[in-house]
Image: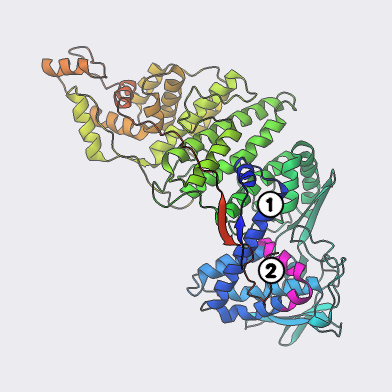
Amino acid sequence: MIAPYVIADAVFDALAAGEGGREAIVLLRRARRSRNLLLLRHVLDGPCGAAAQAGADLLSQVEGVAPETVKALLDGPSFGAWAAHAAADCPSHGDGICTAGDLAALAAVVAIRAGVVAEVAVPVRAGTLRLPGLGTVTGIRDARQQAVLATGVGTGAGCRDLPEPPATVDAGFCAGSAGVRSAPGAVDVRVPGDVHRLPRDLTREGHRWQPVAVLRAEHGGLTLCLPLETADPRLPALDTLRAGPVAWQGLLQSAWKLLVDSHRARAEELAEGLNGMVPLPAPARGVASATSRHAFGTVLASWPASPERLALTLLHEFQHSKLSALTDLVPLYEPGGPACLYAPWRPDPRPPGGLLQGIYAHLGDLAFWRARSGTRHEPEQADVTWRLARTRAQGERGLAEAFTHVRLTPLGIRFLERAAAAMGTVDGGDSGYDSDIGGGTDARTTRAVLRVEAGSEAVWRLRWAQVDEKETQRLAELWLTGRAAQQPPQDDVRAADGSVTGPGPEFGRWAARQRGAGRAGSAQEAAAAVVARPDRPERWAELAAAAAEEGQPGAGVLRHRTELVRNLLLHLVEARPDQPPPAEARRAEARSARPSPPAGEDRPPDPLALAAWLAVVHPRPPQPRTSPQNTGVSMSQNARSPLENTSATG
């Protein structure tokens, strides 16, 4: 009987709080291994199964003599990425290449690591043979776009004649990823008219051979081993000449010391689960980092320049890996609801899954900055204080968005409630100016952060939220005739198209000024500036921030429905009457929530008054609900290996 995976309540709650420990990471890695095996079975049974069969056969053979080596491949970064790509790409072959055949290269790597004798045809593209986790062979010229890779050459033994490989073969094998130090026999790459033999020590460069460097950091009894992956065609890698392995090695050692000393429990998780680093091109500013949904434990990052930044990147990105693996087992939300949501850490709208991923990664960031708070000297401490306050403010706002708009399952509600408790948020309601995001921050910093966050959301709304013109006209007529506001039009956010940059330099300069300001400017002055130039987003940011800090009655509308207030303002400016409204309308006006301009005075409507008028009917976000206690899930814990009649999940 195949047993299901069952996540204990304590493990689920620990993961939801952003942690989990070694036990949780082992469980998630095993679950991801089962998923990878199911994807392999899907590929083999599909229309392109024949292309993958040779690689699967070789994996099956190696599994018979070196099962742990095969498990390491299944757990590593390259196999999951290949399986997901092949399952989705075949048989359409959107890029014109059948990726199912790439399994042969992965199988060849396992054969080399295990030191077995084998021959397998491997794909060659643009004269390059990539062996993920091991290295790259260049200068291959063959019109068939494939080569025969022969392993264990000269040993005179067959695959099943070899014993379990000695420990020296897997000396560099940490967390299921790194390359070999030495392997029995030679490795040949054969094409018609040419045989190229790889170096005996595959960790050293050779003629036409570029190995994948293995980074190793040790401190406090914990070891982290990461290949600096440059040989996987499915992971976007950068040539490491600018910041080579020696530079990465030194930076990783310093970052690891920081993590072990300041975040021991998280460091234990990383030592258990991280299995690769993919260097990315450096952006114009800052550090670029990412996680592949299908490569559990692999971090993609540009050169981070400082140990602190690398440590934060490792924590942040591994949070994404943990949640991706957990959601393979536990559905946290259901389809439906808004598809484009506000995530304060991103310039573009996010789907529900992306929003939850960002919230979860912010738990790792928050733990990092909490530990760093109070350990630095000025001005470094001021920067840590700012980052701590802003990380928590963004996390709280993300939680409010998720509780309000995502169709959470009962376990999803429980998950976010635990996340909210870990973040220091006691409810899932709206994150307003009365929110206590202190956590060691001073009141001045808290106010500045909240101003930036209110302004950021206002600018985001102007950029992505759309307003129905007919509905806006309806509201304008209500205002002009002195009647009370009615239900505002439905919130409608459009999806981003292509790459998205930030809101622009004007807003950036406004946000930078807030950090040094003790308080916001006058809301009335900000409103006048908006009326003068309603096309300037940074003026709306200032208005939303000032209204929130002063506690204006329409502050929430100015932040959460900025686009509606702007459109209504523009409609009223266009329809502004030359004469004051009739006496009956003025009397109705007096009974409504908006103030009346003095008789005979023709002036644009006040955005603060418009927002206060709309606030009477603007809905408030719902509060979180209670959650169940049973977290048992059903997925095969021992999914049968399609390699042979053995279980490869352990």
- Image: 66 above or below 214: below
The verdict on residue 222 being magenta is no
The secondary structure that most of the magenta stretch takes on is helix
Magenta-highlighted residues:
61-77
Mark before the other along the chain sequence, 2 or 1:
1
Question: Residue visible at 66% across and 52% down?
Answer: 299
**Image quarter hosting the N terminus:** bottom right
Residue projecting furthest to the front: 1
Which labelled disc corresponds to residue 648? 2
Question: Horizontal placement of 560 versus 4: left or right?
Answer: left
Question: Residue 145's x, y, as percent?
Answer: 63, 80
- State how far apart marks 2 and 1 are (Cα): 18 Å
Q: Residues within 10 Å of mark 1 (few under 14, many from 20)?
A: many
Question: Residue visible at 39% across and 19% down?
Answer: 552
Q: Nearer the viewer, residue 389 or 231?
A: 389
**Image quarter hosting the C terminus:** bottom right
Read off the residue under disc 1. 25
Q: Secondary structure at mark 1?
A: helix
